[in-house]
Amino acid sequence: MLSKVKTCALIGVEGFDVFVETDIAGGLPNFNIVGLPAPSVKEARERVRAAIKNSGFHFPSQRITVNLAPADLRKDGSAFDLPIAAGILAATGQIPPDSLGGKVFVGELSLNGETREIPGVMAIAAFLKERGESGKALQLILPRGNAVEAALPGGIAVRGVSNLLELAAYLKGELTLEDPEADLDYILAGERKNSQPDFKEVKGQLVAKRGLEVAAAGGHNILLTGPPGTGKTMLARRIPSILPSMTLEEKLEVTKVHSVAGLLPKDKPLLNQRPFRSPHHSATPAGIFGGGRNPRPGEVSLAHLGVLFMDEFPEYSREVLEGLRQPLEDGEMVITRAEIAVRYPSRFMLVASRNPCPCGYFGHPRHMCRCSEAQIRRYRIKSSGPLMDRIDLHVEVPSLEYNDLESGQKGESSARIRERVETARGLQRERFKGTAIDCNASMSHRHLQEYCPLGKEAKNLLRRAFDSLGLSMRAHDRIIKVARTIADLEGKKNIETPHIAEAIQYRSEDRKF
């Protein structure tokens, strides 16, 4: 007898339909899975066999052939256990074959027939919704632990089962499964915790704080340069406290990437805060950009719509630093293999920090630098010109005087800074409504004339800076984007000369040496 069960698989964060065709015929007992299965899928034979027997069902002692169509795409993961088991039960008449219509099955099985959670459920549910197969006619049947996560995108009916017995009873009409209505109000309630470090705890460094505020308001990349102990890392780790809130669409997009990576916390079906990733400088290119035989997302994708903090920037390998160009420019990471090319979204705000020289004290007023000019130059050029061009703000973090440390005066709180950032982002959302642009940093060259017109004085100032600093066209455009953000923070409709002047001074530090 033949049965056909619909399931879904993922390439990166994009889904595609898979049909599990099960044929049971006479002959010596054998159980084969064909259709380009990975080793993890081939192992489903033993899991499914044990799960069916230990659940009290009959496992046929015949020739069983399971085909995963389309056969030219590689299938990986344990999510095919549940559809394969359902196909065998339907082919042997232990569940009604006509009950499989209009349903999509995904899930892993344990040896006793219980279902186990799988990664990527959010991406699967989003794919089914985007294909237009919405409404209660289409059901996604999966492990109960994944039900709330799958229900978040909406548009499809979700049914969670705990084991094979529940699945069979539901398909026979003997059991009713609850529709897990995702309580978004409850999930969204814990958006921001008070335990985050606050900017009011940072002494001095007003210029650096201002630079981080501008970067957060416009989604700009920023480089902090200064001697050891000036607070570069401390400032960077307080950025999450001033980042703007995410929209529901952004939350679903971030959650989808973490779900595919298998990093979604069990108690948090929806991520409410922007990611903050801080990989060590010894991280490999595969760890930063993603990789593996079945490519998984790396740090640049896990930081999507959030912050990627790279401390000791020049200490990263050259492959890592130069590899940042593509995600910084395109907003996505493409991982190419012989069999497949996987795309992961990677629109993040890069926050990098570095010392001014190998010993860290070049230009320090109280410490003598021990580095030669050649050593300083080699250290600086580890960050190549094309990479530096893609960093919008270059901010110097100077050493503090003792009076600054002794002062009991607290700085401005993160809450007040965040209010201004939220207001600026609100202006940007209104400005870019109906477009794919989410913040000023995402504008391309063709958008500048429409959204960032300059007056005569501002143009003349920018022209002089372009010639004197030897700026590239990319740096020219990024100055205008930063100026647009500065104007938004002041609530100004048009970019004025002071806004261009401030944006220019954020590009001049790297050319000081």
Image (spheres, helix red, strand yellow):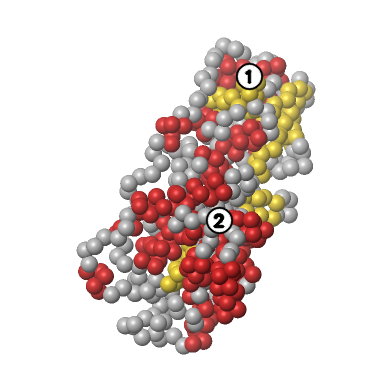
Q: Residue at x 49, y 56 (%)?
A: 492
Q: Looking at the image, is 93 positioned above or below residue 224?
A: above
Task: Give how far across and how far down residue 173 sits, in percent.
Answer: 60, 12
Viewer-nearest residue: 310 or 409: 409
Viewer-nearest residue: 130 or 30: 130
User: Which residue is label 2 attached to?
Assistant: 440
In-image side of 378 versus 1 (left or right): left
Query: Which quadrant holds residue 41?
Result: top right
User: Which residue is label 1 attached to?
Assistant: 58
Image mark for residue 380: none
Of tags 1 and 2, which is closer to the observer? 2
Query: Which quadrant holds residue 76?
Result: top right
Query: Which quadrant holds residue 133?
Result: top right
For this orientation, the residue located farthest to the front is 456
Could you tell which of marks 1 and 2 lies nearer the N-terminus?
Answer: 1
Secondary structure found at label 1: loop
Q: Residue at x 53, y 19 (%)?
A: 177
Task: Give how far across and how far down residue 121 sits, in percent.
Answer: 57, 36
Q: Looking at the image, is 88 positioned above or below residue 81?
A: above
Secondary structure found at label 2: helix
Q: Residue at x 32, y 55 (%)?
A: 413
Q: Residues within 10 Å of mark 2 (few under 14, many from 20)?
A: many
Amino acid type, mark 2: Asn
Viewer-nearest residue: 322 or 50: 322
Q: Residues within 10 Å of mark 1 (few under 14, many from 20)?
A: some
For this orientation, the residue located farthest to the top is 174
Task: Give how far across and how far down residue 179 sits, in percent.
Answer: 53, 22
